[in-house]
Amino acid sequence: MKKIMIIFGTRPEAIKMAPVIDVLRREKEIETVVCSTGQHREMLKQVLEIFNIEIDFDLDLMRENQDLFDISVNSLNKLKEVLTEHTPDILMVQGDTSTAFISALAAFYKRIKIAHVEAGLRSYNINSPYPEEANRRFISVISDYNFAPTEDAKQNLIKEGFEKEKIYVTGNTVVDALHMVKEKLNNLELSAKNEYELNNSFGENLFAKPFILVTMHRREKFGDEFKSVLKTLKEIALQRPEYNFIYPVHLNPNVQVPVNEILKGVKNIKLIPPQDYFKFIYLMSKCLFIMTDSGGVQEECFVFEKPVIVLRDVTERNEAIKAGYAFLVSSNEKLIKEKFFEIENNLKNGYNYFNCENPFGNGKSAEIIKEILLNN
Ligand code: UD1
Ligand code: UDP
């Protein structure tokens, strides 16, 4: 019987691993062990609760305002202990966080096979997203199973010289995760109504106006560039009092401080804490459109048919750009405003941004991954 250890540390990794854990735990031929580095704390806890994920080992590493050394240095030694004691045949990592990279490195040092979920994403700019573009390239070098979400991701890996036999196109498990919870959206309608409309949590009706959903947290923008985007957002909000801008603010102090400094007090900008996954996708399903620098959100918005303004210089989700529902605007004030007003106008005129199949898969990725692990 194969022993597989799944490891994650942050909110998006847990969301995208949840369907894999679900499928593997039901498979009798596989022993599944789940480990969290605890790179995130509250934001991870929200995901574990929604998906009922039980953790076998929790390294509990998060520290206030940690830097890139903290997680990397602190996790490597602890992972050595866990991997030495529990000797999985395969360690599965997801994406491009510090947790994913350092865990893969620890497995490599222990000569344990590595399976990389969401392999082959590339922006081809080593500084953007930072440090994620480097992390995912490092993982590819030492990975034994590359689970590429799309054909483009597979082609990136082939172009870089990785062996075809180690690359499998699986779709993105984020679509599986959405399917797992989407069915429950109707039940959610009631509790979310309480939350967002009946003033229970926020002291006002957040849905009193149509709204734009906003998230931003990427490291490469921290500092002046981040502030400049916030100022542009503020100007747009002041120009468009007929909309609310709902912004669940990431807990990173490098995000919290400037966001509160620049946006707090703007009447139609609603700064709220990170929302649990149910509530966030509920917000996604109800918004007009989205402004974000998130990776996962660029993939998820297809399911809810919400166009997305990507507040980045480059994206590794070019499938979304090619499909015509995602738009790169960098931190450029003019581009952000132009795209905002264009999408607003197009939606008013009934323009349909979603004429193609979901480029990120059909929600069967976790099953495909399981079959590959069983048979290879
Ligand atoms: C990390 C990942 C990024 C991913 C993002 C998802 C790295 C280098 N970055 O960035 O790729 O897109 O997660 O959200 O791996 N914090 C809390 N509570 C939480 C989570 C974070 O208070 O539940 C605060 C802490 O002060 C922490 C800080 O945020 O020190 C930064 O967290 P960290 O995981 O290092 O970076 P993220 O910006 O979240
Ligand atoms: N998300 C969430 N609550 C929020 C904001 C985002 O559950 O308040 C979810 C979102 O649906 C997506 C994931 O978190 O699945 C994206 O996480 P994030 O943007 O932090 O990381 P990235 O995908 O950029 O690595």
Image (cartoon, rainbow, N blue to C red):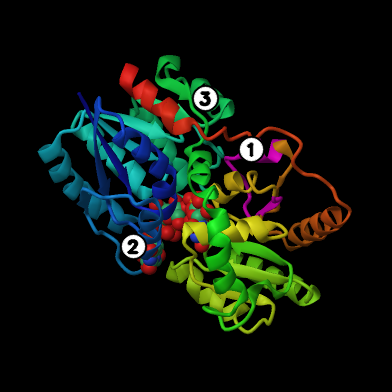
Which quadrant, please, contains the N terminus?
top left
Measuring from the top left, give residue 268's x and y in whole percent: 69, 77
Residue 375 lies in what quarter of the image?
Answer: top left
Question: Which residue is depicted at the point 41% across and 40% down?
Answer: 19
Q: Amino acid at mark 1?
A: Asn
Q: Amino acid at mark 3?
A: Lys
Label whose residue precedes the other's in the sequence (1 or 2): 2
Task: Looking at the picture, tell me which residue is in the foreground, 205 or 375.
Answer: 205
Measuring from the top left, give residue 41's x and y in whole percent: 33, 62
* Mark 2: C-beta under 8 Å from nearest atom of ligand 1: yes
Task: Looking at the picture, tell me which residue is in the foreground, 22 or 365.
Answer: 22
Task: Looking at the picture, tell me which residue is in the foreground, 12 or 144.
Answer: 12
SS at circle 3: helix
Using the numbered discs, state the Cα–Cα distance from disc 2 to disc 3 in whole angstroms. Answer: 32 Å
SS at circle 1: helix
Q: Find the magenta span and give its range.
A: 306-322
Task: Looking at the picture, tell me which residue is in the foreground, 241 or 257.
Answer: 241
Q: Amino acid at mark 2?
A: Arg
For label 3, the residue is 154
Q: Is residue 129 visible?
A: no
Residue 41 numbered mark, or none:
2
* CB within 8 Å, label 3 to label 1: no
Q: Seen in the image, is 274 located left or right of residue 77? A: right
Measuring from the top left, give residue 369's x and y in whole percent: 41, 28
Q: Residues within 10 Å of mark 2 (few under 14, many from 20)?
A: some
Measuring from the top left, give residue 347's x and y in whole percent: 82, 54
Q: From the viewer's perspective, is residue 32 above or below residue 345?
A: above
Using the numbered discs, state the Cα–Cα distance from disc 1 to disc 2 in whole angstroms. Answer: 31 Å
For label 1, the residue is 318
